[in-house]
Image (spheres, coloured by chain):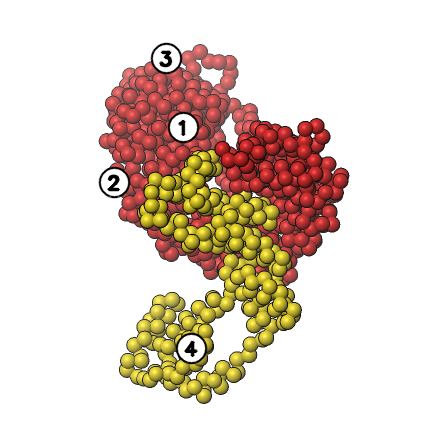
Chain colours: A yellow, B red
Amino acid sequence: MSLSWIFLGQLDSIEPMSTSKKVITREEWERKLKDVKIRKEDMNKLVMNFLVTEGYVEAAEKFRIESGTEPDIDLATITDRMAVKKAVQSGNVKDAIEKVNDLNPMILDTNPQLYFHLQQQRLIELIRIGKVEEALEFAQEELAPRGEENQSFLEELERTVALLAFEDVKNCPYGELLDVSQRLKTASEVNAAILTSQSHEKDPKLPSLLKMLIWAQNQLEEKAAYPRINNLSTAVLEDPTI
Amino acid sequence: MPASATANRPEELVERLGVGGAAAEGEALLKALREVKNQIIGNKTKKLLYLHLGAVPRIVSVLASAEGGGDAALIVQAAAAIGSFACGVEDGVRAVLDADAVPQLTRILSYPDEKVVDAGARSLRMIFQSKLTPKYDVLQEKNMKFLLSLLYRENENVTELAASIIAHSCERHEEQKALCDAGVLQRLVKLLGGPLNQRDACLESIEAIVRNNSEVAQKFACIDNGKALSSLIELIQDRYPRTRLLACICLIAIRHASPCYVQEMQIKTKLILILIELLEEPGKAGDEAPFALTNLIMDEEELHKQAISINAVEKLCNFFYKGPIEARRLQGILLALAELCSKLEKCRSQLISLQVLNFIVDALKHDCTDVRTAACSCIRNISRSLKNLSAGHLSSETVVVPLVQLLHDESSSVQVAALGAICNVAVNFATRKSVFIQCGGVSQLVQLAKSMDSTLRLKSVWALRNLMFLADRKDKECVLMELTVSNLASLICDSEHPIQEQALTLVSNLIDGCGDTFEHAFAEDSAIINALTRILHSASSPGVCMQACNQEAESTNTLVQVLHLFAMHSLRDLIRTFYRCIEMLPIKGMFLLANIAAGNEFHKEVVLNCLVPPQPNGNNPSFIIKFLQSKENLLRVASVWCIVNLTYRDGLCSSTRVARLRDAGIISQIKTMVNDPCLDCKLRVRMALEQCMDFENSEHVH
């Protein structure tokens, strides 16, 4: 079964060289697209899913009222989730941890890696503001026991503590830990964990649909010349190049 | 020390928790409780610290009094803290159970405030995740009612709790049937359509309800005309790895419980494919996938082939090259490889050519008991290959030394597994037997052969027996010197039949081949022969069958309990092994006697003495007569061989021996067997009679 399929696939890719690709004109293409029916409610759900997952709580609330689309999650929990995310992004990690625990105490208890990363972020913030003594104490009391439980945590801890050894931390080998990107990384990890705990998908569906569109276009490209969308933000159909 | 830290010192915080006395009240109590909760969540060290300070009973008493006062915020914080103590630390679970937190948490499930209900349900879920938590008795009517009411609640946390209570508590057939009859399965199937976390919890509890129960599994398969089953089949292709895994585990359980479902090769192949793909997943889904795979293909050669055809061995072995593997996953991978190597030579040779043996040997030294055990099983099954054995892959010091070290392991399950591997590897140490002897293997085996634990005794005698197999004279003597004749004699008379059988084979291997080794059988006043005679006597006595059956019934009862978690066929195999043992014992013993009777005049005399004692003990007929009348073909053949060797005309005493056999009624018994239904037996009978006739004829002439 699979063998014959591969064989046909090879034939397909050879064919265009000998014979020309099938050409689909813009009129024909648009006519065909017209026949495809998409339900408004589905569109709205996708938009709502995007707003909810990305945490645009006010927009989601307005959209709910205007379109009548019910979100699959309590909108209040988005506010909480966003507050956690924001706390990490602005360096208030302890605050973020307490908020997560109020939201659902199981998240950090059943997710040692996330808990470690949050504690690590706390350490990074202490180092950033130059509280060397406090940082050392924190590393020893809170993080070292986690390192004993898990080898990879220990390695990460060592990298983090190494920051203390450098005068110019920004330019030291592990300087990227002090970068904003590290905060964003931790924040998105927390965000994903909260979504998972709420039985919600970590990623919005819209990007996957667009990925699928590009993939399908590339598949078709091999067999036919047709008007394709190259710019996703404008979604303009571009005439086929023959 | 920072100011906040001094204010929140654990000792002081604990002081403030509780009711009355030095305890805080109102806002201050809430604050202290919240602080403790935030310190312990995710932090094992802190949990242990607060446990030792006695925080748990204090928090539970706060919960109780807050319930009275209806203070929702306090209840939520207390419940969350209790749940966290029960997560990840065994002492924590014990403390929570001892403080009687479960009934209190259960009560708050009926609060009108959803936040309180959520907190209670989450906390209880943590508690019911632990093995230490007692099962919830679903056979009690009021409990079943309560469980059902939880399953029908709108709150996702509550339905998840109900599902996890079922997964935790449902083990016995009666419980499974009761849950099924109460309509729990239908409800769980409905909940499968709900949110992700609820779905996973439902899959776990469905598995617990159908596991090993064909009746319930069939009922499940018939729900909505098979729609429940098809929804499971859809879920094995779900987007979420954990859901895929749990759905696979569920289907495997149904397949094992009820052989008529999930039997199409197509679906089995799909399961194998999905489980192998799941190996790549990080976290729990990937860790558990190899266990499910092992369970799926267990003992089915067809599925082994299928797995090998989709490169299962290669994919499993690749992990060894990807750097250190976490213990649970490593154990799973080793067990899956062990299963795959249990039947097919192709798999074993693939494993050797992928050069992962070193990794497996390293796993013998792993910190985790389960990993060491799994590594032993792996080596045992690789060494089922004669090719691998003869190529010497497994008899080098790098393999043998760590295996022998495991004989000293503190865990008896590791010892048993190591013995299993050594049994196989020992068959063909060839020139390397000395490696094994030098690194202290024999002395440790001899020690274990004296163990109180019968499994250890059995396996070590088995290993010694294999070590004796085709060994040269020097090695045989070396082993016997460690073991000593008297130990061997007592092993022959061991209380366990399988051990007796192994001990007899050990003697056969010992005296096999060159004539000198025969002498060992007669050392220490023929201790070995005497032991042999004793067990043959008792094997022939009329009570023995009954006794054996009683013993079997007894052990079967305990077995049934132990094997509740396993598939039924393993129990059947065990019973079969047991029966075979009882049947084999006299057969082995008689062949052994026959072999000894092939020796010189002295040897023959000893054998004859144990068949026909010089001082007759009452009117008891010799045990050999019973054996000659046995329905077991092999036992008759072995017994007649013994007579053939005793009556062989080569020495002066042959005629006296024939006379003694005749007087004991043995010859006349043999005469009745000239038309024995077993051809082999018939031939030997004629041989024996011809030899006896010669004597009788010559006597007449005389």
Q: Nearer the viewer, mark 1 or mark 3?
A: 1
| Tag 1 subunit | B
Tell me which label, 3 or 2, sits earlier in the chain. 2
Amino acid type indicated by mark 1: Asp
Mark 4 Cα-neighbour bin, 10 Å: few <14, some 14–19, many ≥20: some
| Disc 3 chain ID | B
Residue A123 position in % (x across, y down): 45, 42
Q: Is residue A225 left or right of residue B264?
A: left
Q: Earlier in the sequence, mark 1 or mark 2?
A: 2
Reading the image, the residue beneath label 4 is: A229
Determine the secondary structure under disc 2: loop
Residue A121, given in percent of the width and then of the height, sits at: 45, 46
* Residue B450 in sight here: yes
Q: Amino acid at mark 2?
A: Ala
* Residue at 63% from the left image edge and 47% from the top image edge: B161
Q: CA distance from mark 3 to mark 4?
A: 98 Å
Q: Are marks 4 and 2 on the same chain?
A: no
Q: Residues within 10 Å of mark 3 (few under 14, many from 20)?
A: few
Are the residues under marks 3 and 2 on the same chain? yes
Q: Which residue is mark 1?
A: B409
Q: Give the residue at mark 3.
A: B525
